[in-house]
Amino acid sequence: MQSPLQRLIPYVLRYRLRLTLGLACVFGTASVSLLSPWVLKYAIDDLSAMVTRVKLAQYAGLLLGIAVTAGCFRFLSRRVIVAVSREIEYDLRNDFYAHLQRLSVSYFQSVRTGDIMSRATNDLSAVRLMVGPAIMYSASTLIVFVVAIAMMLSIDMRLTLIALIPLPLVTLSVKFFGAAIHRRFEHIQAQLSEISAVVQESLSGVRVIRAYGQERAELNRFAQANQEYLNRNRGLIILQGLFSPSLSLFLGLSALLVLWLGSRSVVLERISVGELVAFNAYLVMLSWPVIAFGWITNMLQRGMASWKRMLPILDTVPEIADTEQTTNPEQVESIQGRLELRHLTFAYGDGDGSPVLRDVSLRIDPGQTVALVGATGSGKSTLLNLIPRLYDPPPGTIFIDDVDIRELPLASLRGAIGFVPQEPFLFSDTIAENIAFGSFDKTTDKAFDQIAVQRMAAVANLDTDIKEFSNEYQTIVGERGITLSGGQKQRTAIARALMVDPRIIILDDALSAVDTYTEERILSQLNTELRDRTTLIVSHRISTVRQADLIVVLQNGSVVERGSHDELLAYGGVYADLHRKQLLEDELATS
């Protein structure tokens, strides 16, 4: 099994040529910068030999040239490596989002949206810093560290060894603080996910919060999560605050030893004044790698902790996906819409729980309308969700045109189905684009069929409402369609389902939010559109289903009755009882 770091390497290797160029520029920056103390050594030693102004000008020009050259290399290294890190972040974000799109509906019912959002934003930014700036500074500090020590050794080996005495303490400090910072940052990112989840839930449920007057309670809930985030950050700040000073302390100890022993070496004429100045300059240069090492360690630990938080999502295998047994899409003939359920038994989860559907068998021919009726919890919506494989049915239980739906490509299966769920979801876009969703790609220049949009809106009895809006079809409906009424959202969803010209259309209590008069008008207009389509309707209203070719009554997940409206009334069973109750409710409502 690959380690987290091995999982990240392929993203980095995509840009290996540009990274190599960037690292070469880093090498150039460090190498050129390290020439300055050596030039300074000769300049100072020449001062004692009555150096001329021309010679001094040459030294000054050389130092200036070194600074300019190093600056150019530094600009190029940052320009290349930071740009590459942004592209790696771009690739990771695209892959992360693409993987989310492949995951099954059941996955999103087990995780919090805010947690996913935090990993896609905050954690991904930390990973970018790890593969960009952290790599750049790591290479720079390594080069400076090695070359500076080599130059110091060439000046005075004994003095260099003395200067490096505190180095083991630096290593121990990095090991201790690095592990502690990694643990702290994992806890901080987890709490940041909690904050994101709280905010997301509050914004999504803002109307419920207002209705129940829970603003203060929600503010307190957020404040508690935010306080915990602050406390965890304080713990990290303490560690970081101790880390850098400890490194500086060891570095200061080294400088003190060099100053004391180096001065004695000058007096004893073991080294020149210029060599001591150069040695100290290299020691000062060595301070950057030591201090930066703590910062880089922090960045690497943050990035790795964030990458480990992203991997569980990327490693989640979609429960529903095309397999080797899936028919090649090119070999799939046009779906006609003949639907058959064969002894369907289904339970959520791993299938070990109590079955939601029990031994359901049903055959629906193309163009036939079948209504599912039953009390809440009888399994109606579950059955509908299984047909487009929002949940996976057992093999050999659901067939379309005599082909097991598990063997059909998902794109072909779902492309043949128009689905209107109980709670229609609208995007924060125009009404026209919400209706056209599924029949066009917004990322292309190809426009959707405006005439078809208007025609489907008319079929759903939505066109009159749209004409009353100031911008008509270009009206922005807001997030989740918040500016529309419940009935308008349902009718928009119906129009959207019809726009894809499906062979099978599923209406899951799709008219529950409209009044009976509007319902009759919609059903009357729908009859023409549904004439050649296989239609499944779920409704609690008998008036919605009475014209269906076949009515199936579900009770506790099992089919207890089936037949036409008149046949079931004559039978005098569950359906007839539901019919009587609704008639009584209607009488009470009108009295």
Image (cartoon, rainbow, N blue to C red):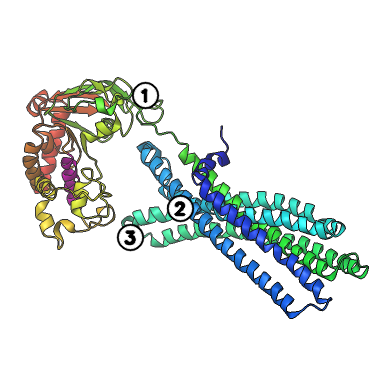
Residue nearest the viewer, comparing 197 with 52: 52
Position in image of residue 541 (x %, y %): 15, 38
- Residue at 43%, 44% in the rendered image: 96
Type of amino acid under label 2? Thr
Element carrying mark 3: helix
Type of amino acid under label 3? Arg
One can see residue 533 in this view: yes
Q: Which residue does the numbered mark 2 point to in the structure image?
A: 121
Distance from label 2 to label 1 (Cα)?
34 Å
One can see residue 190 in this view: no
Task: Give the foreground label among 3 and 1.
Answer: 1
Give the residue furthest to the right: 268
Position in image of residue 519 (x %, y %): 11, 44
Type of amino acid under label 1? Glu
Please tell me how crowded label 2 is: few (under 14), some (14-19), or many (20+) other residues with Cα within 10 Å: few
Please tell me how crowded label 1 is: few (under 14), some (14-19), or many (20+) other residues with Cα within 10 Å: few
Q: Quadrant of residue 64?
A: bottom right
Question: Which sits earlier in the primary sequence, circle 3 or circle 2?
Answer: 2
Q: Which residue does the numbered mark 1 point to in the structure image?
A: 324
Q: Which residues are magenta?
A: 485-500
In the image, 266: left or right of 96?
right
Q: Which residue does the numbered mark 3 point to in the structure image?
A: 210
Q: Quadrant of residue 299?
A: bottom right
Residue nearest the viewer, comparing 185 with 545: 185
Return the mark for residue 497: none
Question: Which sits earlier in the primary sequence, circle 3 or circle 1?
Answer: 3
Instruction: Characterize the magenta stretch by its predominant secondary structure.
Output: helix
* Residue 538 lies in the magenta-colored region: no
- Residue at 19%, 41% in the rendered image: 497
